[in-house]
Amino acid sequence: MSGKVDRSGLEAAMRPAARLKRIGALIGKESKQIMRDPSSILIALVLPLILLFIFGYGVSLDARQTRIGLVIESPSAVTEELAASFDGSRYFSVQRASDRRTFETALVEGRVRGIVVIPAAFTEDVSAGRQPQVQLLLDGGEPNTASLVDGYVRGVLAGWAQQRAVAAGAAAEPAISVAPRYWFNAELESRNFLVPGSVAIVMTLVGTLLTSLVIAREWERGTMEAIMATPVTAGELLIGKVVPYFVLALLSMTLCVVLAVFQFGVPLRGSLIALYILSATFLIPALGQGLLISAATKNQFLASQVALVSAFLPAFLLSGFIFEIGSMPWPIRLLTHIVPARYLIPGLQSVFLSGDVWPLFLTNMAAMLVIGAVFFLLAARNSRKRLQ
Amino acid sequence: MADAGTGPAAEGDIAVRLEQVTKRFGEGAPALDGVSGEIRAGEITGLVGPDGAGKTTLLRLMTGLMLPEEGRLSVLGADTAEDARLIQTAIGYMPQRFGLYEDLTVAENLTLYADLRALPAAERQAVFDELLHFTDLKRFTGRLAGKLSGGMKQKLGLACALLKKPRLLLLDEPGVGVDPISRRELWKMVKALTGEGIGVVWSTAYLDEAEACDRVLLLNHGKLLYAGAPQGLTARVEGRVFHLTGMTGRRRPLLERVLGEVDVVDGVIQGDAIRLVLKEEGTEKPDWLAGEENLSLKPVAPRFEDAFVDLLGGGPGGRSALAEATRKRPIDGDETVIEAAGLTKRFGDFTAAEDISFTIPRGQIFGLLGPNGAGKSTTFKMLCGLLKPTEGRGRVAGFDLRRDAASARGRLGYMAQKFSLYGDLSLKQNLEFFAGIYGLSGKHRRERIGLMSEIFDFSGWQDMSAKELPLGIKQRLALAAAVMHEPEALFLDEPTSGVDPITRREFWTHINGLVERGVTVLVTTHFMDEAEYCDRISLIYRGRSVALGSPDELKASVAGPGLEQPTMEDAFIALVERSEAGNGEKAA
């Protein structure tokens, strides 16, 4: 036996057919593992279902039947009329009292979200034709709710004033009347934009969290080392990981969409093609990030923490899914530009609620591709076939 | 460095050539420091050394998965820095945990590696059949790899590494935690491969494995201490190794005494005898045994470990400052301190330990010997009150573990596997924490902590976090934490796994000293020679106690024609086989 290793073995191993065979073997292996591993099923199928149900049924950003306290310091026919307008509003559930102190503790404890005070001078001011004053106390600890209550209270007051004007036989129409119509989400159902948004969250879970976990697990169990000592190349290993989780993420996405449309009645006004093209593009940065995380950490616990903080939370908070990017301070707004989900959410929302808006889709897809390319380059640099 | 091998090899027979290989990880001492040597085709080369010696790093360098900072490696004639992929087509590598996918079946694992190694479809069936036959896994092809026993996993790992007949086979600690029967079978298989000209590198921390290799590279702290045939190393202590026998009464005080003599390099308890390595050859009774008529020195064959200790400059001496600072409890006769009576633990329909019974009198060391997964730790945990037995009962220091586990735990010291310290706390904080949980307080606590720091020489390490401590210091710290409250009973779970022989001796010197002070010790181990430090041992195999007795009794019970001088491992294998045969008869 001669000492030199013979090069024909390497040439044979690097033929395209041999490469394809290895990639096929890796994909097949990964698929079997996904099907047998309860944690993959949990992240890819069960978690999306739970998330969708929470957003579909549990979370609502609309204020309906918000509890407020109504303080009437000196009752009269006029104040009774105004109180009736509050009672009649579908936004409020009203409790009454004659002293504001009655509600102070309730406001502190969050049992009411606001206190409307109709002062003793109110009736007199109205009858004297002076501008009447109403005080509104709000819980600034919940700014979203506070501003909603503020808006609704103003609405009720304006409605009441107009009614009085009409009743008084004054000019029936105010100078300008605004007739709002909310396009794309006519009833302003928050479910209609939360459920499509959660599709992005689910794909982040599968694309980034699950992918980084399974690769880190291979490092922990020593299988990565064993595989790397075979003629397999780093590129083949990467493809072998990316393809199965790409398919799995699209499956979870499909599950979410079916549920959103048939269970929650969210409209799907755009085309399925657009939906899949957008989602597939989003998966490029998502998977790239997962690969990068696992290459850098090589440890499941650390990988899950990094994935949660760098992918899952930004997809939630910095993507425009729940908080509008336009109202963020500028440094945060700048930061959102590197969050891939930020470019998916507007697209998803238009596919569901308005239709295919290709100019919007294309610019967003371009941004996702750029981020994805950066992640993949970094991941490839980090996962050359070397242990360190 | 003497090369006591079989003479210079022809260039064609060299599988791996190491030239001044240095590998660093961050700051501090290099993991490998200027290692040169060669590995030959058609031989088993042992890569021998304690944990942290650099064995795994060297193997990874040979696969081309890592590159050295200095020096070069030539594997099968190719340089690892330039031709890693070429090398990877011609080697088989089994990493420490065998590199198997636990959620794939045996057949799926084989197919995956066959695909990755481009084994032609035409040959595949024949190769699978041959390997499955070779590893005796044919019956289990449909079983998930995660559901195989340690021995079977090891064989499957080997089969995966052998799929495309490699020219060089690299095995990283294949014998760890596997039962001796499987270990012996694996050895036979690997030996058969060398007959076909395959070069094998077998890394190990077990010095008895090293002895069986054709050649060894002995590493310690990243430095190559010896390269050559193991006999070349043992030759340096030839004629200097003896059994001291004939003592009446306790052996350990005598061991302590003789270790104090200047011409004694090393000494350990071995069954009923004391094994000694002396500085000089000679058959005359040394002066320090004059007047001890009944004691006699009998020359015995040297072992690799004797030579390793000699090479490192000898053992640490026999005095234990820890024992001297420990309150003495009188050892009188047969007072039982630890008792297991019919201990049984079932998890669902799996019986982890079945009907385990033994008693340990005060001042004795009792060993539970068996491979990983045999039920040692389960038994152990039941006796510490950490696990509730399904049946049977246990007593420690007079307390029933069912009724009074908390009181019993206050009387015992526990050193868990791998020294379960708080890695992110400093050494000092660890000591304070353990003093706290054992209820030491105030002046007493400060005194004990101070004493431990002095005895174990912790100055200089106090503020380092425990996970960064060297293995030897970690082990001292774990022992200090376990004995700080002067327990009556000491539970040691695999206490010296992977440490170098000097550290191991230092540890046992303390244990021996404590035992003389009336501490009772229960130890689990899978090291056959560590079992011989015990007064009595129980062989645990598949949840049952296969045999119980003193090491010499067990060895004697299997001695016979063809096996005049059985080792502990021979005894283990023979007794397990005997017990299996007994079960077979019962079943029939």
Image: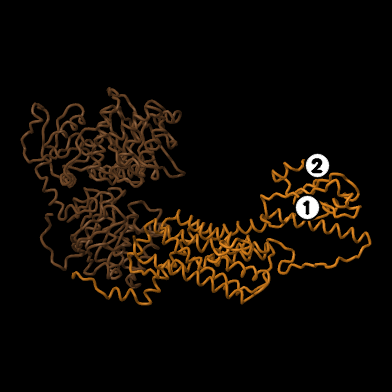
Chain colours: A orange, B brown
Tell me if residue B179 comes above or below residue A29 in the rendering. Answer: above
- Nearer to me, B253 or B452: B452
Q: Residue at x 77, y 67 (%)?
A: A180
Tell me if residue A105 comes above or below residue B139 in the rendering. Answer: above
Q: Residues within 10 Å of mark 2 (few under 14, many from 20)?
A: some
Q: Is residue B196 visible?
A: no
Q: Locate residue B466, reporting x and y percent.
A: 35, 44
Quarter holding the N terminus of chain B is: bottom left
Q: Quadrant of residue A52?
A: bottom right
Q: Locate residue B254, reporting x and y percent.
A: 18, 30
Image mark for residue A99? 2
| Mark-to-mark CA distance, 1 and 2 | 19 Å
- Nearer to me, B224 or B430: B430
Q: Quadrant of residue B421?
A: top left
- In this image, B510 relative to B306: left or right? right
Q: Residue at x 54, y 69 (%)?
A: A282
Disc 2 element? loop
Image mark for residue A187? none
Residue bearing the label numbered 1: A92
Q: Nearer the viewer, mark 1 or mark 2?
A: 2
Q: Type of residue at label 1?
A: Phe
- In this image, A212 relative to B190: left or right? right
Question: Going from the N terminus, do you reach mark 1 or mark 2 first?
Answer: 1
* Residues behind callouts 1 and 2 on a single chain: yes
- Nearer to me, A123 or B338: A123
